[in-house]
Image (spheres, rainbow, N blue to C red):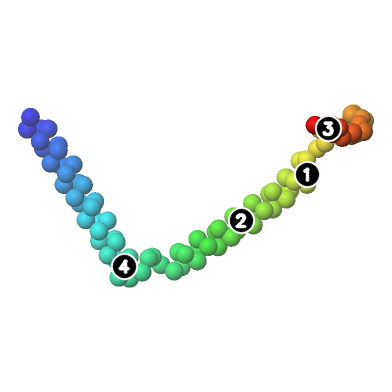
Amino acid sequence: MFKFIFVMFFFFMLLLFLLGFSVLRTFKNILFGKGNSTNKEKQQQRTTSNRQQTNRSEAQYNTTSRKKIIGEEEGEYVDYEEVKNKG
């Protein structure tokens, strides 16, 4: 019984410790801003380069890997005739 209470007390103290760090980080962000501007710039550069790379890959995929599945000799032309109901 004593071990169970000790373990519960330990987890409660750990939770309070982590909660305290979270509150401190929130106050720091409110007072001093949300992080370093150089980190934001690096993240924007990474995002831009990822988008450019994705666009290049899609362009390559669209031009090189599209092959016609059905040959031109298959199929036939069918005249379309519209039928109207009188009623």
Question: Whole-percent x and y of residue 15?
Answer: 21, 47
Q: Amino acid type of disc 2?
A: Arg
Q: Secondary structure at mark 3?
A: loop
Residue at 55% over, 58% down = 47
Q: Point out the tag, 1 or 4, that comes first from the N-terminus.
A: 4
Q: Image height check: is 5 above or below 64? A: above
Residue at 64% over, 51% down = 54
Residue placed most toward the observer, 30 or 43: 30
Q: Which residue is mark 2?
A: 51
**Tag 3 near tag 2, CB within 8 Å:** no
**Tag 1 near tag 4, CB within 8 Å:** no
Q: Amino acid type of disc 3?
A: Lys
Distance (Cα) linking label 3 and label 2: 57 Å
Q: Amino acid type of disc 4?
A: Ile
Foreground mark, 4 or 2, reads 4
**Tag 3 near tag 1, CB within 8 Å:** no
Q: Which residue is mark 4?
A: 30
Q: Which residue is mark 1?
A: 64
Foreground mark, 1 or 4, reads 4
Q: Secondary structure at mark 4?
A: helix
Q: Image height check: is 23 above or below 10? A: below
Q: Which mark is residue 86?
A: 3
Q: Point out the tag, 3 or 1, that comes first from the N-terminus.
A: 1
> Could you classify mark 2 by the number of other residues whose Cα lies within 10 Å: few (under 14), some (14-19), or many (20 or more)?
few
**Tag 1 near tag 2, CB within 8 Å:** no
Q: Amino acid type of disc 1?
A: Thr
**Outermost residue toward the bottom?**
32
